[in-house]
């Protein structure tokens, strides 16, 4: 039995419609076109107190984020490069995933994670993409084979919600395809295991 898979996008910056958020929206739109239901957690929704393991996730934004991630079949992470790495806003949100360590699927396990980095140059874009993929590994997620390192001095987004650079647009759509394909395969395998019981 096929069911609709749920893809959650997390990222952006405190600026609404930031470049990272626009890139994230492109991936989520493409995932939706492939039949997924999608949810975006970006901008102000990511503004939460610094993660403190002694306190857990107390802020409503943190609880909403964790609930969305716990229910996701696949994820997309997007961060701007801040001084060569993931922005504090995005990293702090990801630090909260520690609270899912005892979840049915701990951390990001069993899920494909598409990673997207945006920067004003190639060096920051590439190092931030590598950092996002490292964090995904650390959280037991499966980074998709393709990630996107976007140099915003060369690739811009249109108000219509696509990237004007067709190569980048294609990369973002391919990331969506890989997340949805993995999520759908896992969902199908899980339903077969369930019905065999
Ligand atoms: C605090 C700060 C640090 C940044 N550090 C870098 C950097 O190390 N390398 C880089 O290429 N761009 C850097 N940038 C530029 C952003 O990554 C770039 O403008 C990005 O496109 C902005 O994304 P946004 O529109 O999603 O906020 C920095 C920007 C800020 C505000």
Image (spheres, helix red, strand yellow):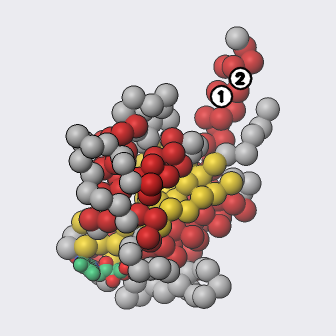
Q: Position of residue 132 (x, y in %)?
A: 34, 57
In the displayed structure, 15 sits above or below 40; it is below
Quadrant where the image shows the C terminus:
top right
Task: Residue 17: give its label.
Answer: none
Residue under the image location 35 percent in, 61 percent down: 48
Q: Secondary structure at mark 1?
A: helix
Task: Residue 192: give its label.
Answer: 2
Find out whether the residues at labels 2 and 1 contact each other: C-beta distance under 8 Å. yes
From the viewer's perspective, tell me whether residue 126 is left or right of residue 7: left
From the viewer's perspective, tell me whether residue 117 is left or right of residue 131: right
Quadrant where the image shows the N terminus:
top right
The quarter of the displayed image where residue 37 is located = bottom right
Residue 81 seen in render = yes
Q: Secondary structure at mark 2?
A: helix
Residue under the image location 65 percent in, 85 percent down: 160
User: In the displayed image of the protein, which residue is found farthest to the top?
Assistant: 197
Q: Position of residue 152 (x, y in %)?
A: 40, 83
In the displayed structure, 113 sits above or below 107; it is below
Residue 148 seen in render = no
User: In the displayed image of the protein, which residue is found farthest to the left?
Assistant: 83
Q: Disc 1 marks which residue?
A: 189
Residue under the image location 64 percent in, 27 percent down: 190
From the viewer's perspective, tell me whether residue 81 is left or right of residue 151: left
From the viewer's perspective, tell me whether residue 78 is left or right of residue 162: left
Q: Answer few, some or many: residues within 10 Å of disc 2's Cα (few below 14, many 20 plus, some between 14 and 19).
A: few
Q: Ligand 1 falls in which quarter? A: bottom left
Residue under the image location 20 percent in, 73 percent down: 83
Count every numbered label the image shows and give the total. Answer: 2
Q: Separation of disc 2 and disc 1 at Cα?
A: 5 Å
Q: Position of residue 101 (x, y in %)?
A: 36, 33
Q: Answer few, some or many: residues within 10 Å of disc 1's Cα (few below 14, many 20 plus, some between 14 and 19).
A: few
């Amino acid at each position: 039995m096929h069911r609709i898979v749920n893809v959650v996008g997390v990222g952006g910056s405190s600026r609404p419609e930031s470049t990272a958020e626009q890139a994230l929206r492109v991936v989520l739109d493409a995932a939706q076109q492939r039949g997924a239901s999608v949810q975006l957690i970006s901008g102000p929704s990511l503004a939460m107190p610094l993660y403190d393991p002694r306190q857990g996730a107390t802020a409503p934004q943190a609880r909403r984020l964790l609930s969305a991630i716990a229910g996701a079949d696949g994820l997309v992470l997007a961060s701007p490069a801040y001084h060569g790495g993931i922005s504090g806003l995005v990293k702090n949100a990801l630090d909260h995933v520690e609270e899912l360590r005892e979840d049915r699927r701990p951390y990001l396990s069993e899920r494909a994670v598409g990673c997207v980095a945006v920067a004003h140059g190639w060096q920051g874009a590439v190092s931030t993409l590598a950092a996002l993929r490292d964090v995904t590994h650390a959280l037991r997620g499966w980074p998709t084979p393709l990630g996107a390192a976007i140099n915003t001095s060369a690739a811009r987004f249109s108000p219509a919600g696509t990237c004007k650079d067709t190569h980048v647009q294609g990369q973002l759509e391919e990331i969506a395809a890989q997340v949805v394909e993995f999520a759908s395969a896992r969902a199908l395998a899980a339903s077969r295991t369930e019905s065999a019981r």
